[in-house]
Image (cartoon, rainbow, N blue to C red):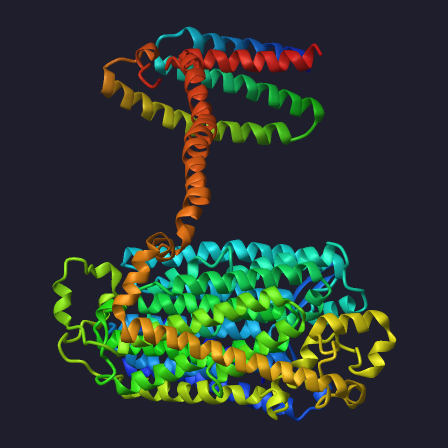
């Protein structure tokens, strides 16, 4: 059954890839959507049977085939569904299915064979993503890990005839490869350290060790794995590919670069929670990188003018928040945010896709405005998505983001918390800047296209060359998806209502077993072994007097903690109110600058022209990488490797061999006189010499 | 019975005669004839050995050699005719164009 989940999209890929050009568009789209829907049903069925199991022993394992067998190394192709994988599988198949449906409308103007190619890639991506999520050991996960990178490349460069799209695809691939290299190295260290690559086995062995006080093998392994995560999940220093990835079709941005693939890094850390919690140094680095990324991307997002790029930086920023959660040991909170984020970020991207679709490829928000009336469905769903991501109370983003902030604060990481709060203020601001500039205000006419500053390169790829004057709202297939995702953005958070608001944070308890070493009993008995108790502390920081969990969790903690619990509840409520205030303040700032006083925004930009320019140019990171890495590599390749080594040494050796033979033959060929009798003489002399040698030896 | 040594001496003389002919004659046909002489010198040696040892092997090999010699003569003469048509000469020193 588990195998069916990735297999169905893969079959869809095969069908569309092999016969796609002969299928009609509805057939190609239908195959792809059907495959995804089948995967969703299979996933739902599997998760349902998972839920029937006792909470502490939830796990379905399917060993599909033996795979690598070599000496002590034994890596079967095993799929395992545990609570963590269950959340991911449902998100990937459900959001993936919706985006497939959306794509049938969005890509409708593609030619038939292109249309099938698009859906083939999309299905292949889903198959790899599901392998990544379900893989029970590092190598199987790595298949998916590499596969999604490949599909990302194929889909970013889908319109490969456009130079910028094909460049962006290559950039994504290369940057991802750097991270993958780290992942591989991390895998090697894990293998040499634990002699196993199975996640549970590694976790079991790591769980018996004390957390590393100094930088040791586990820290090294986790740090290398984290390098892989920064590549896939677009964190500093490898985030640069994600904004450029917006060259791909918008549904691809929604599926791969917002909802699923980029979360792989977060998921991988969650999958190795036990390992990471034994490496406090790495955890600190993870949290630091996360919060730095969140802040940096948030500030860049504030001034970008391309609707999809704003969303891309927002994704980077939100992923940063997830890494903060991972870094402070709040794995469940991070995964929770991942899950809610998948809904509202997919919604926002698809909403932006609907806008772009309606405006025939326009992506610059300065040329939009006043679209509220023409695109009501898009507007309202986009608004809901923005409210959710901003963290307005009672929407999904609020619960998850607040959970992260609270865990960060209660874990004692005050600085990280403060920066994360600033980042969420920025989130609210840039999201509503987007909303106000796109949907409110004065309607920009399409006559603007005559503007000399408008260049085709900056807009979406030409496939939506529909009639320019008439604005049409999202077609049914797109509208339904938007509405469904909007419902998800509102409701998805209610599985994780924190205890302080009267909920029981069910998702956290559901996920809990995935972050524990298998075989370690949870609760009071665990503290008998000091190592496990310590692991537990780092793990979730539940033990740090946090009553909110205790009273709904294992009974053992509740009685002594009740005194402190009251204070904590007050603090948590206070923080919650504070962060809600922050969200509203962000919206307020956006409203002031971009709705009421547009001139004020320009004035501020002019006042801080230097800072504005730096932000507009994304901190010159691309330029920095270009100068520090790309150009030196190019120069070394050209000057040293090509002109000296390749042209000199390698070509020299080959050509030298040739000219040596040439020169030697110039002398030797004199022997070939063409005279038959000379040849006969040489044969005769040869025979005499050989015979003579044997006779007089 | 003539001792083996006499046969071998005769064979050697024939072989030397043929070899000298191959090297010194300036007519391709004579060269071919000299080769025949060399082959027959070898045949003689084979038969002499076979007779001395009381085995038929020498005679068997002789038949093979005669067969090959016949084939060689046929091809050789055909080549000679072709060469003659080409160059109006039978002197082997004329045919030296097959070289670097």
Q: Is residue B63 above or below residue A564?
A: above
* Residue A559 placement, left or right of A288: right
Give the camera-side residue of A118 and A207.
A207
Query: Is A335 drawn above or below residue A667 in the view shown?
Result: below
- The x and y percentages for residue A23 are 30, 79
Of residues A470 and A425, the one nearer the viewer is A425
In this rendered view, identify the residue nearer to me: A222 or A237: A237
Q: x and y percent of residue A471 in the render?
A: 18, 80
Closer to the camera in the image, A325 or A93: A325
Task: Find the residue positioned furthest to the right.
Answer: A528
Q: Quadrant of the N terminus of chain A?
A: bottom right
Residue at the (72%, 78%) spot, across then down: A542
Image coordinates of residue A239 in percent, x first then y, are: 47, 59
Numbered circles on residues, count: 0
Q: Which residue shows up at 47% across the image and 67% down it?
A: A317
Say above or below: A668 vs A493. Answer: above
Residue A555 lies left or right of residue A326; in this view the side is: right
List x then y, in percent, for residue A133: 57, 74
Residue at 24% across, 16% down: B87
Q: Is residue A13 visible?
A: no
Horizontally, residue A54 falls left or right of residue A118, namely right
Residue A588 visible in rendering: yes
Q: Which quarter of the rendering shows the C terminus of chain A? A: top right
Dividing the picture into quadrants, the one containing residue A241 is bottom left
Seen in the picture, residue A595 relative to A188 is either above or below; the reply is below
């Amino acid at each position: 059954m588990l195998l069916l989940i990735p297999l169905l999209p893969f079959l869809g890929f095969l069908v569309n890839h092999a016969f796609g050009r002969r299928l009609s568009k509805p057939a190609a789209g239908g195959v792809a959507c059907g495959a995804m829907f089948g995967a969703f049903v299979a996933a739902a069925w599997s998760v349902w049977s998972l839920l029937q199991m006792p909470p502490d022993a939830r796990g379905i394992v399917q060993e599909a085939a033996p795979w690598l067998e070599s000496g002590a190394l034994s890596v079967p192709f095993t799929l395992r569904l545990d609570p963590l994988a269950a959340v991911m599988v449902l998100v990937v198949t459900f959001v993936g299915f919706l985006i497939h449906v959306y794509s049938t409308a969005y890509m409708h103007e593609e030619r038939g064979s292109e249309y099938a190619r698009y859906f083939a890639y999309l299905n292949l991506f889903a198959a790899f993503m599901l392998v990544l999520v379900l893989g029970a050991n590092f190598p199987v996960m790595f298949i998916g890990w590499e596969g999604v990178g490949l599909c990302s490349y194929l889909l970013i460069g889908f319109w490969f005839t456009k130079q910028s799209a094909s460049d962006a695809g290559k950039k994504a691939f290369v940057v991802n490869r750097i991270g993958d290299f780290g992942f591989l190295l991390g895998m090697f260290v894990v293998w040499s350290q634990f002699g196993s690559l199975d996640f549970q086995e590694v976790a079991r062995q790591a769980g018996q060790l004390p957390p590393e006080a100094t930088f040791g093998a586990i820290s090294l392994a986790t740090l290398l794995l984290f390098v892989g995560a920064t590549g896939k999940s677009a964190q500093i220093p490898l985030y640069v590919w994600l904004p450029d990835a917006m060259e791909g079709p918008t549904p691809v941005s929604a599926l791969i670069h917002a909802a699923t693939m980029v979360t792989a890094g977060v998921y991988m850390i969650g999958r190795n929670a036990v390992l990471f919690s034994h490496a406090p140094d790495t955890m600190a680095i993870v949290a630091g990188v996360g919060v730095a990324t969140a802040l940096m991307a948030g500030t860049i997002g504030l001034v970008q003018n391309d609707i999809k790029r704003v969303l891309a930086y927002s994704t980077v920023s939100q992923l940063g928040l997830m890494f903060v959660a991972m870094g402070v040991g709040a794995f469940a909170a991070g995964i929770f945010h991942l899950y809610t984020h998948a809904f509202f970020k997919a919604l926002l991207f698809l909403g932006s896709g609907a806008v772009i679709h309606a405006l025939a490829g326009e992506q610059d928000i300065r040329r939009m405005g006043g679209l509220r009336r023409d695109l009501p469905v898009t507007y309202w769903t986009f608004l809901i998505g923005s409210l959710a991501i901003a963290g307005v109370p009672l929407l999904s983003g609020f619960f998850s983001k607040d959970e992260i902030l609270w865990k960060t604060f209660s874990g004692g990481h005050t600085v990280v918390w403060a920066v994360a709060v600033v980042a969420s203020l920025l989130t609210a601001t840039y999201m509503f800047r987007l909303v106000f500039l796109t949907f409110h205000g004065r309607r920009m006419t399409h006559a603007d296209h005559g503007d000399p500053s408008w260049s085709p390169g900056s807009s979406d790829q030409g496939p939506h060359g529909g009639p320019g004057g008439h604005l049409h709202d999202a077609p049914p297939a797109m509208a339904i998806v938007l509405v469904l995702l909007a419902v998800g953005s509102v409701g998805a958070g209610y599985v994780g209502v924190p205890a302080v608001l009267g909920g029981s944070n069910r998702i956290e308890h559901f996920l809990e077993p995935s972050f524990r070493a298998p075989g370690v009993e949870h609760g009071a008995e665990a503290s008998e072994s000091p190592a496990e108790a310590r692991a537990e502390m780092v793990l979730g920081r539940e033990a740090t007097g946090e009553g909110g969990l205790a009273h709904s969790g294992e009974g053992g903690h509740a009685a002594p903690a009740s005194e402190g619990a009251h204070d904590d509840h007050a603090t948590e409520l206070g923080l919650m109110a504070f962060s809600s205030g922050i969200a509203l303040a962000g919206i307020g700032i956006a409203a002031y600058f971009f709705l009421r006083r547009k001139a004020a925004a320009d004035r501020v930009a002019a006042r801080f022209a230097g800072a504005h320019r730096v932000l507009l140019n994304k901190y010159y990171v691309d330029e920095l990488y270009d100068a520090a890495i790309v150009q030196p590599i190019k120069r070394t390749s050209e000057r040293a490797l090509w002109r000296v080594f390749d042209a000199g040494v390698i070509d020299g050796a080959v050509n030298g061999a040739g000219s040596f033979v040439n020169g030697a033959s110039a002398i030797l060929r004199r022997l070939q006189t063409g005279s038959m009798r000379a040849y006969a003489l040489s044969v005769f002399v040869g025979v005499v010499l050989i015979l003579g040698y044997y006779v007089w030896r | 019975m003539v001792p083996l040594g006499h046969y071998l001496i005769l064979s050697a003389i024939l072989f030397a005669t043929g070899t000298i002919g191959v090297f010194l004659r300036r007519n391709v046909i004579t060269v071919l004839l000299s080769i025949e002489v060399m082959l027959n010198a070898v045949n003689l040696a084979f038969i002499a050995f076979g007779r001395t040892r009381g085995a038929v092997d020498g005679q068997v090999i002789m038949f093979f050699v005669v067969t090959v010699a016949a084939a060689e003569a046929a091809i050789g003469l055909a080549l000679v005719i072709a060469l003659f048509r080409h160059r109006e000469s039978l002197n082997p020193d004329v045919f030296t164009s097959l070289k670097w």
